[in-house]
Amino acid sequence: SPLIKKKSKNKNPKEQERSLEQMDRGVVDLQELRRNLELASAMLDAVYTDETRRLLDTEDELSDLQVESVPSEVRDWLACTFSRRTGLSKRRPEEKPRFRSIVHAVQAGIFVERMYRRTSNMAGLTYPPTALNALKEVDQWSFDVFTFHDATGEHALKFIVYDLLTRYDLINRFRIPVQALVQFVEALESGYSKHRNPYHNLIHAADVTQTAHFLMLHTGLMHWLSELEILAMVFAAAIHDFEHTGTTNNFHIHTRSEVAILYNDRSVLENHHVSAAYKLMAEEDMNILVNLNKDDWRELRSLVIEMVMSTDMSCHFQQIKTMRNSLTQTDSIDKVKVLSLMLHAADISHPAKAWPLHYHWTHSLMEEFFRQVPDRNAKFGEDKSSLYIADR
């Protein structure tokens, strides 16, 4: 800065060397020491301010924030730190906010601004007024996904995925093409509707995605997770039952279906869900991950595979055991295991929700159970009536 350059010119190298020699001999010129400290302070202050401005301008988009959205303690801290106004400079040291709390407050302010940014103005998807009204409850545990499905013109999955990616600012962060995103999620909805399942359909996918969001938000885990991990959670929840056949893994194995043969009788449906969803993105106009770098793409894919595989009910008790063991080891917890358990919990969460929602889901699930019976009998005859029940 001009101030630093000016002060630097006033002290030549010989004077600096003489000052150092005096200090080595134990002779301290207080005025000289004061000038040196002022110069060092000015340099550090300028570097810190410039670097902070650069980081905030490029990464946190603070230029988008309104003054009202910045917490009062943040404004006070900034004022008392970077201004010389008399009233603030006399503030007692114990009243000055700690730097760590200020960082958390800034992060919270940015997150709140992003979470509640008006999504109806986003290019590429127009929200029906009824959908915007229903989305006011999206942060609640017993979010009524059936009402939301009706409010969106039977496109619950499309709007919940789009809304959450917007709220978490993931569309901007990973430069997801909006039109590709819309087409991709519409293709997901078509795949979920392929077999006309009463339970494993796009409404269930939307419900699980919203529940995963609730778990991240209200447990505080979203502050522990990276943006890529949050993207993995939303993405995995959206695709976790893609093109579900309405029949179980056990059914596929015993009927020697094409997918059972393809995946060697191991997590048959779960393997298909991930594979089929990634095949959609092979189409250029639906490649929502086109702008991810190689490392992020591989990490996201690894996370998504692990998470969707964990929704296989045969893994349930092993998951519980693994997590209990992890909680006894406080030094480190495997994030992938946590994410997997969260998605699995969201997948089977409706018994813990409001009774009308649980009743609706249970009725749909029982209908799907019974629809499988004719197919089973056609293949095996009546003596195989325990085939489906054994899988549950």
Image (cartoon, helix red, strand yellow):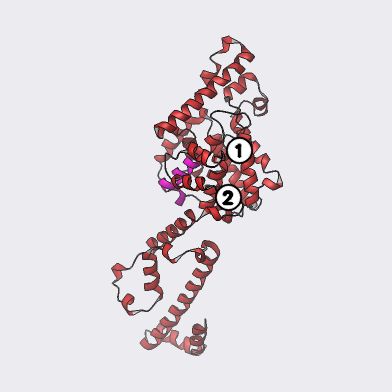
Between 61 and 163, the one lying in front of the other is 163
Residue type, label 1: Glu
**Quadrant location of residue 22?**
bottom left
Q: Position of residue 110 (x, y in %)?
A: 46, 59
Q: Is residue 340 visible?
A: no
**Relative to 170, residue 280 above or below:** above
Label the magenta part by its dominant secondary structure: helix
Mark 1 lies on a secondary structure that is helix
Kindly identify which residue carries mark 1: 189
**Could you classify mark 1 by the number of other residues whose Cα lies within 10 Å: few (under 14), some (14-19), or many (20 or more)?**
many
Which residue is pictured at 40% across the width and 34% down the height?
Answer: 354
Which residue is pictured at 46% across the width and 88% down the height?
Answer: 18
Which residue is pictured at 63% across the width and 36% down the height?
Answer: 190
86 in the magenta segment: no
**Relative to 302, residue 246 above or below:** above
What's the distance in space between the residues labelled 1 and 2, CA to CA?
Answer: 17 Å
211 in the magenta segment: yes
Q: Position of residue 160 (x, y in %)?
A: 53, 44
**Relative to 237, residue 31 above or below:** below
Q: Which range is magenta? A: 209-224
Q: Is residue 147 left or right of residue 197?
A: left
Residue type, label 2: Thr
Which residue is pictured at 60% across the width and 30% down the height?
Answer: 244
**Could you classify mark 2 by the number of other residues whose Cα lies within 10 Å: few (under 14), some (14-19), or many (20 or more)?**
few
Q: Residue furthest top?
A: 383
Kindly identify which residue carries mark 2: 126
Mark 2 lies on a secondary structure that is loop
Between 188 and 49, the one lying in front of the other is 188
Q: Position of residue 161 (x, y in %)?
A: 55, 45
Between 151 and 303, the one lying in front of the other is 151
**Relative to 21, residue 285 above or below:** above
Q: Earlier in the sequence, mark 1 or mark 2?
A: 2
